[in-house]
Image (cartoon, coloured by chain):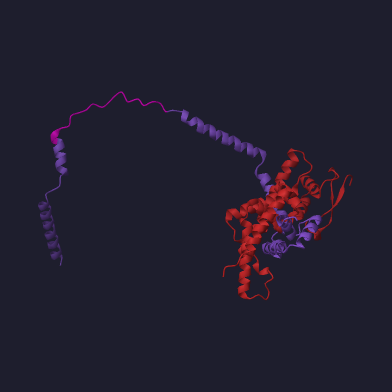
Chain colours: A purple, B red
Amino acid sequence: VIPCDEFQPLLSAHADGALDTPNVHRLEHHLAGCERCREDLANTQAAFDLARLPPVADVERRALVNLPATALTELRRDRIGTPIWRAFAAGFLAAAGMAVVIAAPTQVPPPFTPPTQVAAWEEPDPAELLALVGEGELQPREELARAERIADEAYADVIADGE
Amino acid sequence: VAGAKAMKDGGDRGAASHLRVLRGGLPEDASPDDALFQAFVDGDDDAFEDLVRRHEELVLKIVRRFTLHSEDARDLAQRTFVRAFEAARRTFERRNEPHVPFRRWVIRIAINLAKNHARDVNRWTRAADYELGQQPYRGMEPLAKLIADQRVARVRRAILDLPRRQREVVALRLDAELPFAEIAAALDISENSARVSFHHAAVRLRQLASEEDAP
């Protein structure tokens, strides 16, 4: 007796109607006496029915109405867009760019040479330095407060006179 | 026309059958695709249209599982034909090869582009929301219809999650209805390998379809 496992590949093909006649006869002879394989066949056919897509719809066919024309346009654009001379030009430019990139680091700038004439150093005058520092110093807080008070009083007087 | 040969258009769309007169010079066993491609290379744009029309239904069936909208499917179909023509032209011109396996290339390119499209935009939800209403649910109770919808979504999503080879074989068999010999040729594998991949996928789908649905 041939075991069921040997019929399984035939069963899958038969479920989709893709089995040749001699094998169909072999399988049907086995199926006549094997309930398990009959059940597997039915389940496989059911799975294929679920897996199959619906028939091609009209809307899908209509989308292809202009397919030859658009494909031909695309085909010619591809061919026109990359003629031989353009491909050669692109290759030449790419090679030139590579050459520039490779050659660029070899152009080393000349070494730095310090100037031979240097300005003479003059000793600064301490009195001038102190005068500069004194101008920049802050005034004491009390003096600032007093100056602000005087200014506020003067401003108040001006306002009062105006009224 | 001296050396001319008449060819009945035997493409995927039988309704549009008509006679075309093409220039001679091809071998007697040349396929219609070879003749049309030769005519297009010689400057006959109508031959291009005929060649696309011969295979557009096939391409649509291959790519539609991996797309959400008909516009996406159309774009993928266009890219498929452009790439297939470019590949055929290169072979034709550089190798001076009169026979180009155009249909095989179209199938291969379509399945690859569709797979990449789904991966790039992460559109693995196609099975969940695609035209479920077209299933024969007439007369079903709402709860039973919901459960049936969930089962359909689960099985269709499972196809997209299958290992690559199994997914390709299942899509080309269930959607494009190609024989295993043609699937094997398109994917560059043996026919036996295609059948084994299909069987493994079938077992997986059968298990999923038999599982109990969540309440």
Looking at the image, which is closer to me, B97 or A76? B97
Looking at the image, which is closer to me, A143 or B116? B116
Magenta stretch contains residue A21: no
Q: Quick check: can you spot residue A66?
A: no
Looking at the image, which is closer to me, B194 or A152? B194
Residue A100 position (above or below residue B125):
above
Residue A61 position (above or below residue B164):
below
Count of picture labels: 0
Residue B215 coordinates in the image, percent (x, y): 56, 70
Residue B95 coordinates in the image, percent (x, y): 75, 38
Residue B27 coordinates in the image, percent (x, y): 84, 43
Looking at the image, which is closer to me, B47 or B160? B160
Magenta stretch contains residue A112: yes
Task: Locate residue A54: give its quadrant.
Answer: bottom right
Q: Residue at x 29, y 24 (%)?
A: A117
Q: Residue furthest front?
A: A1
How would you classify the magenta stretch by its main secondary structure?
Answer: loop
Left or right: A85 with respect to A139? right
Q: Residue furthest top?
A: A116
The quarter in which the N terminus of chain A is drawn is bottom right
The quarter in which the C terminus of chain A is drawn is bottom left
Q: Which residues are magenta?
A: A109-127
Q: Residue at x 60, y 74 (%)?
A: B143
Task: Locate residue B114: give its quadrant.
Answer: bottom right
Residue A90 position (above or below residue A28):
above
Q: Quick check: can you spot residue A141?
A: yes
Left or right: A102 with respect to A158? right
Residue B1 coordinates in the image, percent (x, y): 89, 47
